[in-house]
Amino acid sequence: MLLDDLSRLSRDNHMLLTLYAEFRFNGVRIISRADSLDSDDLHSKLGFQMRGIVNELYLDDLREKTLRGQKGQKARGFVVGERTYGYRSVPVGEMRVDRRGRPRPDGYKMVVDPSEAVVVQRVFTEFVEGKAITSIARRLNEGGIRGRRRSHSGWSAVSVGRILKNQKYIGRWMWNRTENRRDPGTGRLRKFPKPESDWHISLDDSLRIIPQDVWDCAVRRWTEIGQTWPRLPGKRGYEVRQRSYVQTHPTHLLSGSLRCGVCGGAIGQVSGKGAGYYGCLGGSRRACSNQLLVHRRLAERRLLAAVQEKLTPSEVQHVLERVEKEFHKLLGHLPEKIRLTRAAVGEEERRIGNFIEFIGNGKGTPALAQALQCAGEKVTALQNELRGLEASAADVFKPPPVEWVVERLGRVQEVLEAETVQSALLLRRILGPVRLVPVRPEVGRPFYKAETALQVLDLLEAPEDGSTLLQWWRRWASNPRPETLGGRHLHP
């Protein structure tokens, strides 16, 4: 093996000596031209070790100088790498030409990329609304939205989750939190956390993409779904209490909201095809005496009717008008900011015109060419910002007419089922835990009373008809040896 320098093989002394021993064992000769070392020379072993130590010390010194230079740039308010989806870096300060003839600014700063910021806001909005991260990734791929990494797979649950946990989107930029160390056994780089005293944290509200309330909602949702997986990072097995997946990703409007009034356990779909029937899950396993069933559609219809009674058109219209006022209050600064941004674009375009005129008159200099380039980049950034501001100003909230509200309230269940997950989480906050208490009157069949944050509701098909108790369920409960087929009880 012919090398120009031993550092081309490895700058880690331990790895260099390991490779040296393996090559020698397999009969491979190593010749380093710049170091004048030959592994066939019996007296070169010490030279290999000394050159390995020197190369490793050089690498340590280079690492220390690089980190010191990066800390200096951070102290001046510049960024060092920190590439993040939703932002782009722009040159700042005087442009100079380095030894290779390339223009170099004083530093770089991050600005919000409007096109990517819209995607980030969409990811957070859909997550807060209750969509799973896998569903968000799939919708982004179906919409043809490209990420930074041009991979064939596109967006994934990992990339979406990384965005949802990145504090840079609320203007909190943290740097120097981790360091890479090479595993002496495998030679692979591994990431290790640094002590908090070495962290560099900067707050810049101009780089905020996600409002604080949306971020707080996302944090709460991460907490809610944190126990829906059996094993967390650094944990083994079921060391924490696992939550039901239905609690965080409901499949029906009342999924995860119903509780048994006898044992306090969960009530879920226990039988039936299609819509099916709700019953106590403990009762289905004979761990609870409550073995009453209610049709899922009936329970949804009765509970939504109670919600609908509270949502009169006038009250909804009043809420929408208040939302409009708050919306205009938040965006009240946009007209003035748009005016100032347009003025800044016009000023920079006039500067570019003056530069071009000077160059056309034969007064061009390298410094003038660099200033022209910086002015052009600044105009592009201002124009992108202006387009984003104008798009935000055009997206003004207007309350719908009363007729539209009445029409939607008339079919509230159909409207809610259009976005089942979001609607189910919203109903859970409105109704609270819905406690279904079985009632067995002296006359008629038993039925459920639903105790919610709104009122106590009778889940009846009709007052004279009684409950939704199925005859086969009663027979199954009393029959110690029911007939079964594929795990399901046959309808008698």
Image (tube, grey):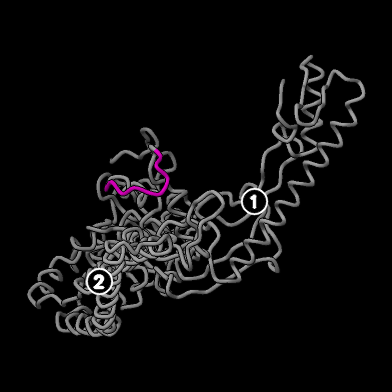
Q: Nearer the viewer, residue 396 or 294?
A: 396
Q: Tag 2 or tag 1, which sits nearer the N-term?
A: 1
Q: Is residue 149 above or below residue 21?
A: below
**Range covered by the magenta-colored residues:** 143-151
Label 1 or label 2, whichever lies nearer to me, is: 2
Place of residue 47 in the rendered image (x, y in percent of width and height, measured from the top left): 87, 31
Task: Determine the main secondary structure of the stretch shown in magenta.
Answer: loop
Q: Which of the 4 image quadrants contains residue 463?
A: bottom left
Is residue 331 in the magenta section? no
- Identify which amino acid the numbered label 2 is placed on: Ser
The image shows residue 203 at horizontal and vertical percentages of 52, 74
Return the mark for residue 392.
Answer: 2
Place residue 121 in its image quadrant: bottom left
Q: Residue at x 40, y 69 (%)?
A: 210
Q: Quick check: 165 left or right of 404?
A: right
Question: Could you say which is closer to the camera, residue 127 or residue 339?
Answer: 339
- Residue visible at 64% across and 51% down in the picture: 235
Seen at 53% across and 67% down, the residue is: 78
Taking depth in this image into account, of 259 and 417 the one nearest to the observer is 417
Q: Quadrant of residue 34?
A: top right
Q: Position of residue 251 (x, y in %)?
A: 33, 53
Answer above or below: position of 72 versus 311.
Answer: above
On the question of residue 446 being in view, the answer is: no
Disc 1, SS: loop
Judge whether residue 146 is colored magenta: yes
Residue 78 appears in view:
yes
The amino acid at mark 1 is: Lys
Q: Is residue 465 left or right of residue 221?
A: left
Q: Quadrant of the C terminus?
A: top left
Number of disc labels: 2
Number of the label disc, if any, that sits on residue 235:
1
Q: Residues within 10 Å of mark 2 (few under 14, many from 20)?
A: few
